[in-house]
Amino acid sequence: MAKDLTESSHDRQNILNNRYALQQAEQHLGLGGVMFEGESVFTKAQVMAMYDVADRTIERYLVSHREELKNNGYQLLRGNKLRKFKELVYGADIDDGTKTSVLGVFSFRAVLNIGMLLTESEPARLLRSRLLDIVLDVMAERAGGHTRFINQRDENYLVSALQEENYRRQFTDALDNYVEGNHWKYARFTNLIYQSIFHENATEYKKVLNLAAKANIRETLYAEVLNLIASYESGIAHELEQASTIQGRKLTQKEAENLFASFEKHPLFKPLILDVRTKMASRDLCFRDALHEKLEAYIQSVPEADFERFLGEKSRSLEEQLSDPETLAVLKRLKDR
């Protein structure tokens, strides 16, 4: 879907939190800057020239988006730091670095940040377009060509998937043993779990991610989502067994649904559901360009740690993980429990 970086703070931050995209951007955009304390920094005069805007325009954004720009590297130099900066740039083409006791400078991130905000600058518009292309290229390259199964690059995915499979068997066995009805009850109660956690049934979820009708959606779920589904499955299996034992018979589907409605309201799940909804909605929009409309209120920017988790050096394709003897040993221990 088209991204309007001038309007969406989480889309801007998703780019700025992706160090792999920033590395490529710094290499290919060639914006220049002055190397100061280990990073490229830019004065306001340089930023004005870069984006062909007036001083008052930059100042307006510094007021309206002060915290965002500050968090992404805009800073005021004073005292000893300013003195060192003046010594470094003395004689360079930087007029506002030599005649003031306080100087605002932009890090490379902050320069990109204000470029994603400026609506009145053609150079900024072109930069936004190039940035989005760079992000797409980096994401595809580091994710192995497609992000549909980017969840599987997490080193925690395989363990969570295997554990959930074990709890899934407990859940289906409980439905067999303690609830009346035909095989449709499995899909019915599975959808109740999905709807409770992320407000979508299986069909709706597949549509959002553009999955085939027969696709196994668990193969696309993040480890945290699988862990919460496993908790539901284990807990519901226990509750069904207890209720059936008390009644001395199998439960009707209506009784089982009432039991589930009571179970999902347990306060234990509130913080877990909030965390899972936030991660799922935010990651899917960032990594898969997939919007869960029913979870739109939970969307946040994806933290830097998640880019490391799914794109970093520790992230590996499922095939690579399954070829690792240590990973296979862990999975075997879990399976043998």
Image (cartoon, rainbow, N blue to C red):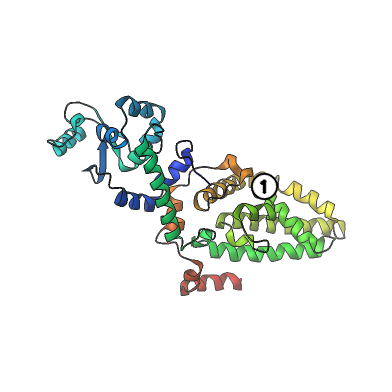
Q: Eyeballing the image, is 96 above or below 330?
A: above
The residue at the point 66 percent across, 43 percent down is: 267
Outermost residue, top side: 56
User: Where in the figure is residue 119, as x and y percent of width and height?
Assistant: 41, 33
User: Where in the figure is residue 292, as x and y percent of width and height?
Assistant: 60, 47
Read off the residue under disc 1: 199
Q: Amino acid at mark 1?
A: His
Observer-nearest residue: 188 or 142? 142
Observer-nearest residue: 24 or 198? 24
The residue at the point 62 percent across, 54 percent down is: 228
Determine whether, in the image, residue 195 is placed left or right of residue 225: right
Q: Eyeballing the image, is 59 above or below 154?
A: above
Residue 185 in sight in this render: yes
Outermost residue, left side: 91
Quarter occupied by residue 88:
top left
The residue at the point 51 percent across, 67 percent down is: 318
User: Where in the figure is residue 289, as x and y percent of width and height?
Assistant: 53, 50
Q: Eyeballing the image, is 277 above or below 324?
A: above
Q: Quadrant of the C terminus?
A: bottom right
Quarter occupied by residue 160:
bottom right
The residue at the point 51 percent across, 61 percent down is: 156
Q: Residues within 10 Å of mark 1 (few under 14, many from 20)?
A: some
User: Where in the figure is residue 114, as x and y percent of width and height?
Assistant: 37, 36
Q: Eyeballing the image, is 88 above or below 100?
A: below
